[in-house]
Image (cartoon, helix red, strand yellow):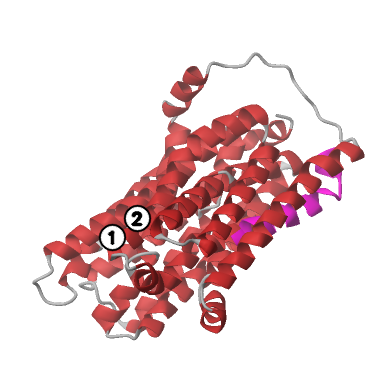
């Protein structure tokens, strides 16, 4: 029995997606308790910022190494270990007696998180055909957006009901159980089912030669730039300045400003499956992806042209469109899957993903510098000029979309045999 024709692949898909959903929720859930941590552990805002930075820096820094190792040794083990690290880190976070344990816990979570998406892409590549792959990436994007959604109102209500430690402890336990379940679903059960695996003996390519070829590949840089512009602008702004922006510029309450994030998440939930469906329908990844990047660029440009304060109805629409663009960014990995041989999909996916999270690390800090520079000016001036940053970043994303070479699209049937 072949993996790509087995009904068991849907069991694999559901298990991997549920684990990804929970892991994504833990990327932003700690932001809900920043004020509580500052009071309980008597730490400064800088320390709280470090908790977030150390997680995303670990994530971004490990993308290429994880891709290389996963391509060489297979994705199953790394996905299992990543879920376990994430679970243990979340458990440790819930039991932390001081800020040093909190920092180490978030480092573990970041290391675990770094293994998830690259290996999810590789596992879907192994178990599903190319035609199915593009659509399933869209569903994976929906799972990620729902994870972010879980870390807003539902998780906040849970924390308000029971204090912050029990929710994190519970999610940590579930993630550790997911790791055990992944071992059974990905390794133990398939061995008993004796799936056919086509192994072609290839001479192992020198790692530095491989990296040099990828770093000199226009297609690899195109995916890096695409993710830099689509993901980093959304995650970087939503995760740091969206709520203060709504409160300072529009006079919203904290709860009201949080609704802006919800609009972005709804856009992402729609964008992932719809953009993937359009790409499959018209037989092109580049065309809809370039349109998505144009939409993202124009949305950020609108903030700048309206002096940093567009009308409220337009503000809501812009957040939905930017969120939609983030959801559509799953096409980055469809480009990778169809442009590179299977033995390189992991490392190129890691390289592309690094672009998104590098942008997500850079945007909040640069935006903060702009706000500090205009601190003595009228409210809104700093935010106005701060929007130059996502405009530039999204322009880089659009350039990446234009650089995509889709000639290999016509060889889709050959790709299924790789």
Residue 201 is left or right of residue 45, and the answer is right
Q: Which residue is mark 1?
A: 46
- What is the secondary structure assignment of the residue under circle 2? helix
| Position of residue 114 measured from the top left corner of the image (x, y, whole percent) | 52, 45
Q: Is residue 31 above or below residue 204?
A: below
Q: Is residue 244 magenta?
A: no
**Residue 28: horizontal and vertical position, in percent?**
47, 64
Q: What residue would you read off at disc 2?
A: 50
125 shown above or below 144: above
Q: Nearer the viewer, residue 381 or 100?
A: 100
Magenta-drawn segment: 1-22
Q: What residue is shown at x 36% (from left), y 82% (from top)? A: 254
- Residue in the foreground of this view, choosing between 293 and 170: 170
Residue 274 or 250: which is nearer the viewer? 250
Q: Which mark is residue 310?
A: none
Locate residue 394 relative to residue 373 in the image: left or right: right
Q: Position of residue 117 (x, y in %)?
A: 58, 47
- Along the horizontal axis of the image, is 279 left or right of 10? left
SS at badge 1? helix
Q: Are marks 2 and 1 in contact (CB under 8 Å)?
A: yes
The part of the image, by quadrant, that contains residue 194 is top right
Image quadrant in which the C terminus is located: top right
User: What secondary structure is the stretch in magenta mostly built from?
Assistant: helix
């Amino acid at each position: 029995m072949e993996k790509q024709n087995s009904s068991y692949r849907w069991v694999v898909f559901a298990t991997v997606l549920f684990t990804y959903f929970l892991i994504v929720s833990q990327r932003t859930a700690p932001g809900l308790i920043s004020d509580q941590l500052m009071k309980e552990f008597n730490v400064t805002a800088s320390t709280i910022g470090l908790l977030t930075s150390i997680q995303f820096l670990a994530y971004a820094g490990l993308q290429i190494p994880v891709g290389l190792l996963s391509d060489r040794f297979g994705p199953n083990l790394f996905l299992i270990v990543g879920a376990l690290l994430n679970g243990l880190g979340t458990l440790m976070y819930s039991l932390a007696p001081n800020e040093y344990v909190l920092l180490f816990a978030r480092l573990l979570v970041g290391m675990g998180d770094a293994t998830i998406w690259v290996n999810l892409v590789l596992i879907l590549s192994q178990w599903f055909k190319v035609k199915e792959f593009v659509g399933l990436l869209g569903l994976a994007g929906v799972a990620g957006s729902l994870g972010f959604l879980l870390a807003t109102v539902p998780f906040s209500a849970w924390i308000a009901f029971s204090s912050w430690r029990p929710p994190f402890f519970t999610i940590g336990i579930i993630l550790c159980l997911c790791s055990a379940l992944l071992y059974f679903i990905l390794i133990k059960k398939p061995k008993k089912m004796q799936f056919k695996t086509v192994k072609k003996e290839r001479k192992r390519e020198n790692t530095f030669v491989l990296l040099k070829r990828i770093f000199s590949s226009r297609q690899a840089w195109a995916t890096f730039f695409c993710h830099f512009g689509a993901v980093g602008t959304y995650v970087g702004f939503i995760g740091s300045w969206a709520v203060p922006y709504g409160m300072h510029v529009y006079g919203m309450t904290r709860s009201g400003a949080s609704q802006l994030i919800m609009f972005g998440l709804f856009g992402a939930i729609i964008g992932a499956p719809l953009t993937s469906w359009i790409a499959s329908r018209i037989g092109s990844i580049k065309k809809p992806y370039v349109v998505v990047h144009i939409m993202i660029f124009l949305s950020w440009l609108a903030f700048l042209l309206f002096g940093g304060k567009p009308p409220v109805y337009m503000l809501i629409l812009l957040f939905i469109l930017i969120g939609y663009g983030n959801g559509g960014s799953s096409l980055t990995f469809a480009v990778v899957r169809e442009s590179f041989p299977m033995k390189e999909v992991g490392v190129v996916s890691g390289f592309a993903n690094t672009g998104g999270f590098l942008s997500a690390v850079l945007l909040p800090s640069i935006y903060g510098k702009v706000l500090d520079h205009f601190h003595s000016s009228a409210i809104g001036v700093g935010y106005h000029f701060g929007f130059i940053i996502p405009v530039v970043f999204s322009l880089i994303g659009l350039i990446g979309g234009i650089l995509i070479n889709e000639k290999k699209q016509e060889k889709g049937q050959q790709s299924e045999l790789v």
